[in-house]
Image (cartoon, rainbow, N blue to C red):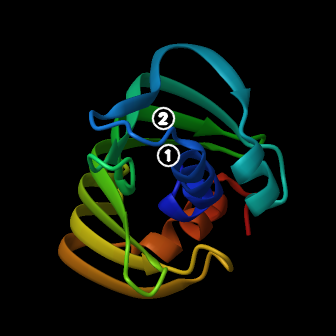
């Protein structure tokens, strides 16, 4: 699972690089994961400060939408994945399923509206429901967050939780 903040640079670059005049959605990514490949996860390895590996099963689709004049309207991601994160110290299984919509606010900030399962550890905490996040795309700072549903962990707490579960014993 990659938190929306980690994907901001990619979302911004894709939105700005999209061709003008495209009225129908542009499929930017359509990736399937068969659950047979385990690889080093660079995001969590850097965030946690130790090697973290991930095995993923499922799929992810990412589309960009434009108005008839070719102006960016929104980006939509459709994750439907199960992840197993491992380190030398432990393992963690989680799910990421739903829809994430990214739009630009009039002030230039980004609104990420996500519904579904953002994080769910069997027998552990979960973050399920609707979250509405306002992000500064330049600083990648979380400016505001609304949560509706069942959130044992807020968006900005998930990374630290994963690192604590995969880290050395205290």
Q: Quadrant of residue 128?
A: bottom left
Nearest to the observer: residue 113 or residue 157: 113
Residue 116 in the figure: left or right of residue 156: left
Q: CA distance from mark 1 to mark 2?
A: 7 Å
Q: Are marks 1 and 2 in contact (CB under 8 Å)?
A: yes
> In the image, residue 55 lies at what x, y percent?
57, 26
Q: For residue 14, which numbered disc appears in the image? A: none
Q: Nearer the viewer, mark 1 or mark 2?
A: 1
Q: Quadrant of residue 94?
A: top left
Query: In the figure, 157 relative to 145: above or below?
Result: above
Query: In the figure, 161 relative to 76: above or below?
Result: below
Which residue is found at the position 19% from the left and 70% from the top? 150
> In the image, residue 31 lies at what x, y percent?
47, 21
Q: Quadrant of residue 24?
A: top left
Query: In the figure, 15 relative to 88: above or below?
Result: below
Find disc 1 in the rendering and name its residue.
1
Nearest to the observer: residue 92 or residue 95: 95
Residue 149 in the figure: left or right of residue 96: left
> In the image, residue 20 lies at what x, y percent?
46, 42
Which residue is found at the position 57% from the left and 53% from the top? 16
Which residue is found at the position 70% from the left and 52% from the top? 44
Crowding at dot 1, Cα within 10 Å, few <14 / some 14-19 / many 20+, comes out as: many
Find disc 2 in the rendering and name its residue.
83
Secondary element at image label 2: strand
| Quadrant in which the C terminus is drawn | bottom right
Query: In the figure, 96 relative to 101: above or below?
Result: above
- The number of numbered badges drawn on the structure is 2
Secondary element at image label 1: loop
Name which of mark 1 and mark 2 comes first in the sequence. 1
> In the image, residue 89 lies at what x, y percent?
73, 46
Nearest to the observer: residue 62 or residue 54: 62
């Amino acid at each position: 699972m990659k938190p929306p903040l980690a994907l901001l640079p990619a979302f911004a670059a894709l939105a700005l690089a999209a061709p003008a005049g495209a009225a129908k959605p542009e499929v930017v990514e359509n990736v399937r994961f068969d659950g047979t490949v385990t690889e080093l996860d660079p995001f969590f390895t850097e965030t946690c400060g130790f090697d973290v590996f991930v095995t993923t099963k499922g799929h992810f689709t990412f589309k960009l939408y434009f108005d008839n004049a070719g102006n960016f309207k929104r980006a939509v991601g459709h994750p439907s994945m199960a992840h197993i994160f491992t380190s030398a110290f432990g393992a963690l299984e989680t799910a990421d399923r739903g829809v994430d919509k990214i739009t630009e606010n009039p002030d230039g900030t980004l609104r990420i509206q996500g519904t579904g399962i953002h994080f769910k550890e069997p027998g552990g905490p979960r973050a399920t429901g609707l979250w509405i996040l306002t992000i500064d795309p330049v600083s990648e700072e979380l400016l505001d967050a609304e949560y509706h549903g069942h959130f044992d962990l807020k968006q900005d707490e998930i990374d630290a939780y994963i690192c604590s579960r995969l880290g050395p014993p205290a």
